[in-house]
Each structure stands twice: as structure tokens, then as C-alpha cells.
Image (spheres, rainbow, N blue to C red):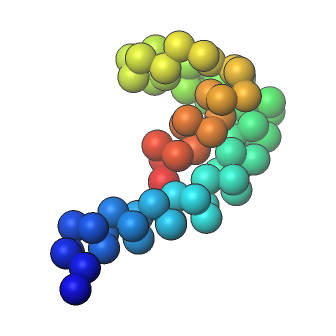
Amino acid sequence: MIPDATFFVRRLTEAVDTLWPSLERSLRTTMSRDPKFKKQLRAWATRQGIANFGDDPFYETVARQVV
């Protein structure tokens, strides 16, 4: 029998792996079209300690956190 916590973490990981690519595309699109959103996201990322703002890994990091 799989412990509840292990089951939950596995399901959560599967959901993140499925959903983050779509969120990453949406994030890139929104940032390119909405300067206010980009500014707010930069401020949020700074508060979260995400230092690679705008780099390719940045989009994946944020998308995974959103999920």
C-alpha cells in the first residue's frame, strides 16, 4: 500500500509536469504584450528570490510555482 503522502506528492508532480508547459507559453505571451504585468512579475520574482528574470529557466520556474 502506498502511504497517503507519497500518493499525493506523486499526483502533484504529475499535474505540474502536465500543466507547466502551457502556463509557460501563456506567461511568455503575456509578458511580451503587457508591460504592467511584466513589471509586477519582476517585483514578485525579486521578492521570491528568483534571480534569473527573463532567462529561459525563469519561465519554467514561475510556471511550475503557479501550478
Residue 35, compared with residue 60, is above or below; it is above
Residue 46 placement, left or right of 2: right
Residue 2, compared with residue 46, is above or below; it is below
Q: Which residue is at the front of the view, 38 or 20?
A: 20
Residue 27, located in which quarter of the rendered image?
A: top right
Residue 35 in the image: x percent, y percent?
71, 23
Residue 43 placement, left or right of 58: left
Q: Which residue is at the front of the view, 12 or 6?
A: 6
Q: Residue at x 69, y 53 (%)?
A: 21
Q: Is residue 34 visible?
A: no
Q: Residue at x 41, y 71 (%)?
A: 11
Residue 40 in the image: x percent, y percent?
54, 23
Q: Which residue is at the front of the view, 28 or 30?
A: 28
Labels in figure, total: 0
Residue 28 in the image: x percent, y percent?
75, 37
Q: Residue at x 68, y 45 (%)?
A: 24
Q: Residue at x 46, y 15 (%)?
A: 46
**Furthest residue toward bottom:** 1
Q: Which residue is at the front of the view, 8 or 40?
A: 8
Q: Quadrant of the N terminus?
A: bottom left
Q: Is residue 8 visible?
A: yes
Residue 9 placement, left or right of 31: left
Residue 18 in the image: x percent, y percent?
61, 64
